[in-house]
Amino acid sequence: MTWWSTDDDEDDEPEFDESAVRVRPNRRGSRPRTKTRPEHADAIAGIVLGVDRGRYHVLIDEGGADEHVLTAARASELRRKSVVTGDRVDLVGDVSGDEGSLARIVRVQERTTLLRRSADDTDEVERVIVANADQMLIVVAAANPEPRVRLIDRYLVAAFDAGIRPLLCMTKTDLADPDEFLHNFPGLELPVFRSRSDEMPLAEITESLIGHRTVFVGHSGVGKSTLVNALVPSAHRATGHVNVVTGRGRHTSSSTVSLRIEHDGRTGWVIDTPGVRSFGLGHVDPANILGAFTDLARIADDCPRGCTHLPDSPDCAIIEAVDAGELGETGRARLDSLQRLLTTFA
């Protein structure tokens, strides 16, 4: 190909033909990239009810005349930020909720709480379970499978670390007396519901859920999904059974989902989660655990710097106050509970 021409009357200096210059097109489009993002002033607010293979089911106008659920995708500017069940988000695009429509999540609003777990106690990478819950209902069976104190301790630590109020539901109490197991938690002021296989305290539990966003957690096979289906008949959460050989339940709930519960014109939200057999605490700040024991935390201000508040801690003001009887009859039980929770990841 000739890039220049010559003329006998002109110098032999080449003349470039601009039309012949080879220019590679911009693979990312004709516009240069910019870090300036649109403000999306017209975005509408919603709350994420569930996540399914990269698609988010979002409730719009909760309790209003235009309440509906739509499907949304995460905007490219949020590709490095997690969006989880319970998140309050801002959306643009097609927010009609019509079949085949797809909105875009462009912002995640500030979270009030964040329930997390890590793979194990040495893993500082957090796995976010749910956002903006204010209660945690720990579901544990009195038998089949046998209750595990250490796992319940871990749930409690995660709840206190997140600033979430814990509740406890003992299922299958017709198979075993739960009193001995419950003696492990005397100092926690933990609300406890007792449920039989043939009789559940649904009214009592429902009353505690109304006006709250409550995340349900529990070991596989404890009857968590059965309880959710009884509280929210439209839930249709899959239920399983306990393996008679291993004593372990089979995972049935495979995703985290929010379900509305109603009573006397009032509403609450049940957030069902997949059953887990372990709950890593590598991300937990021990100071948050002490903060959940407000009476002990006030005394801890007089502890020496770096005090762990464990039995071998020298000059621990909490231990000295309990030994002196300054915290009354429940002081010893609350200190024992605090120390056991602190040792779960010490």
Image (tube, rainbow, N blue to C red):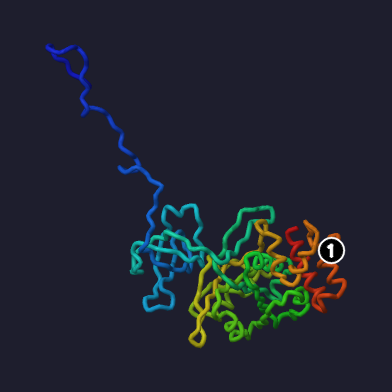
In the picture as drawn, the residue positioned furthest to the bottom comes out as 264
Residue 101 in which image quadrant: bottom left
Q: Position of residue 335 (x, y in %)?
A: 79, 70
Residue 188, x across and y down, in percent: 73, 74
Residue 85 at x, y percent in the picture:
51, 66
Locate the N terminus by quadrant: top left
Residue placed furthest toward the left = 9
For disc 1, the marked residue is 311
Question: What secondary structure is found at the residue carrying circle 1?
Answer: loop
Q: Position of residue 292 (x, y in %)?
A: 69, 69
The three-letter code of the residue at mark 1 reads: Pro
Q: Nearer the viewer, residue 221 or 274?
A: 274
Q: Residue furthest right?
A: 324
Number of residues whose C-alpha sits closer than 10 Å to that of mark 1, classed few (under 14), some (14–19) or many (20 or more): few
Q: Which quadrant of the figure contains the C terminus?
A: bottom right
Q: Is residue 245 visible?
A: no
* Quarter occupied by residue 72: bottom left
Displayed quadrant of residue 248: bottom right
Q: Nearer the viewer, residue 209 or 203?
A: 209
> Taking 98 as reference, is 196 left or right?
right
- Answer above or below: position of 232 versus 123: below
Q: In the rendered image, is residue 274 in sight?
A: yes
